[in-house]
Structure formats: structure tokens, C-alpha cells
Image (cartoon, grey):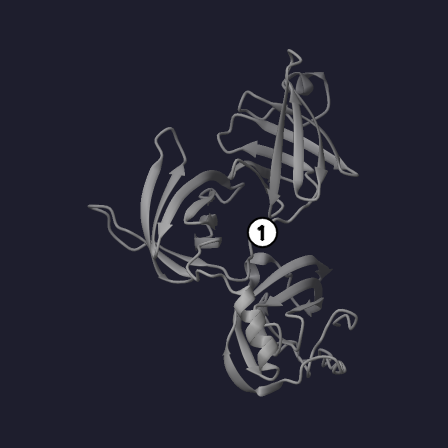
Amino acid sequence: MFNAAHMRISRCSRPAQVLTAVVYCLAVETSAAACDFEKAVGQCTATIRILEAGGEKPKFTAKVDVTSSAQACSKVSVVFANTPWTFFIRSGGRQTGTIQTPNAVRDDTTKIVECATYAGDVKANASTTAASMPSDPFNVTGLWRESDEMMFELFEKDGKIAGMEMLNFQGDTPGYYRIAGTRQGKKLTLTAYISDEPSTFGFVLKDANTMERVKKPGASGHVVYARNPSVKLANRPEPVNGLWDTLDRKLRFNLTERDGKITGFGSSTGVWPELMEGHRAMSDFDLRVEGTRDNDKVTLNVTDRTGAPTSTEYEMRDGHSLWAEDFPQLVRFRD
């Protein structure tokens, strides 16, 4: 059931596919805007983050955070693992609460269907929408998916693009590769550094959430990427525990974090040694790592066998990538 301490809902919201579910009705806050959810007046943009997820059949739960570009009087329709939910946001532009579904909630099974604004506190609604919407609607920052095997994570600033391409043709652990490029209007040029010979492609934005790759001479078919608006790429600090890999596959680390202090070891050979304790396994690691994490700022001090230290400061984005000099440098290989 929704956590009443976090939610501002103007009327009942029922998950359409859970026929035995409780109807969620919370009291209207007297300080919230007066909204007429029968009178739609426009569109908005929404994002959703899954903060926690758990449970087991027949009941799974997830704590979610839903935001709207409209400060007041908006309705966000979302599908979680084939279960529809509707969020009525009266004020504040955000709701955080817990949902229940008969299926496990994951990022790849969560989809925002619609974000609409409604009559009410027009002044508050309009002012916040103007402040929250990006000045350029074609900014390509976000998660772009061609298929489950090919995806882009792109960050754009002032027409310059940096990010990663994810390839997962084997159905196992995906490979990440650095992406760099530019955008002018609706035209993009992206270069993927997958091998010693980078590949460059052109793309054209069909709309704010769809882009098509420009055909090269002799090529056939259409390659279309769609942006998932439910995934908002941003700085999201998380503990660095796990295996990390540089995009050029030359450095690999096994890191552990406790109370903001980082310790670990790594390999500069480009090959993962056995991740088991013991003399043979540890002899394959030639790097020692110490460091700290303060929110999204990560500092790693790496010492090789000669005792020569190297210190690098990173910015964590989306919990699984560490950036320096405006480019992704390390990707979390596995928790």
C-alpha cells in the first residue's frame, strides 16, 4: 500500500490488473493545489526511478520515485511489469511511495505511458514546467535502445556528446564501449571506440525520443533507436563494491567500500585473474587500490608493484560508471 507520509494523491488509484487489490484513497492536503482531473490541458514529461524492489510471487513490492515537469495538477500513467498504475500529482511535482504487483519490478519492465497536465493552479503549473523543461527538446541525454543487445547511454552538453555503447550479443555480461560525438539540430555524429579502428555513424532525430541511423552506401534496412523516457541519467551515488573495468580493457579492479573508504586490488594485464583468495590468485593482481567516496565524488589511489602511486578523481553517474575529463573511464562489470 502507498506510504501516506510521502504521497499526495487527489483521488483513488487502482492497479488495473490486480482485481483483489486495495483501492488507494488518501486525504487531500489542504495546502495542495485544487486540480480538476477531468479536464486535461496539456502534456508534460515524467521520469521514474526504482529505489528498492523485492518480494516474491504472488506479491512483489517496489519503492518508486515519480517526478513530473509540471509542479501541480499532473497525471502520470506507468506500467510496472504489465501492471498499470496512475499517479495523480497535486503539487510538488513528485511522489515517492511503494507499489505492489504480481510480477517482479525492474527497469526493463517499467514504462511511462503518458504524462498529462490538468486544470487547476495554472500559474504554479506553468512556471515550474518552464523551469523544468530543457531549453533544447532535442538534447539526447538518456538511455537509447535499439534492442536488448544494443543500447546507448548518452550525455549531451552544449552540443557535445559523451557516453557508452552497450553490446550484449552473447546474452551474458554486456560489453561497454566509449562513445563520443556531436549534435547540430536533429543531426548527430557518433563515434564508437570498439576496436583500434573507431566506427563513426550519422543519426537523424525523427522526434525527441526516436533517432534513425543514416545508411552507409550499400547498407540495407533501418536501424532505429528509441529513448526510454522512464530512465533519467544523472549523478546517482552508490557504494563502489564490485568489479570495475576500464573501457579500453587495460585496467580492472575489485573494489570494496565501507563508510566511504575504498580498498581493493586490480590487474593491469587486461585479463581477469581468478577472483578467489589464495596465493596463486593474488599473485595475478599487480595493483593495490585505496580511496574514498564522498557522495558522487570518487578518488582512487592506485599503487603498482614498484610502489609508484597514481591518484585519479572521478564523478559517479548512474551508479555504474565513473567519469573523468568529461568521459566515462570505468564501468561496473559486476556487483
Q: Is residue 116 above or below residue 239?
A: below
State the residue in front, 122 or 209.
122
Where residue 191 appears, x then y in whole percent? Answer: 37, 40
How dense is the environment of label 1, judged by Cα within 10 Å: few (below 14), some, or many (20 and up)?
Answer: few
Q: Is residue 168 above or below residue 90?
A: above
- Looking at the image, residue 233 sits to the left or right of residue 188; the answer is right
Where residue 41 appears, x then y in whole percent? Answer: 51, 83
- Name the quadrant containing residue 122: bottom right
Task: Identify the residue at image location x=47%, y=61%.
Answer: 135
Where, quadrant-wise, is the C terminus in this rendering? top right
Is residue 74 visible to us here? no
Q: Is residue 285 above or below residue 32?
A: above
Q: Is residue 298 above or below residue 237?
A: above
Where residue 127 appears, x then y in whole percent? Answer: 57, 72
- Name the quadrant containing residue 136: bottom left
Where, quadrant-wise, is the N terminus in this rendering? bottom right
Task: Point out the residue furthest to the top here.
Answer: 306
Callout 1 secondary element: loop
State the residue in front, 2 or 119.
119
Task: Identify the residue at image location x=37%, y=57%.
Answer: 211
State the residue in front, 9 or 279.
9
Q: Which residue in the protein does label 1 denote?
A: 234
How many numbered markers are drawn?
1
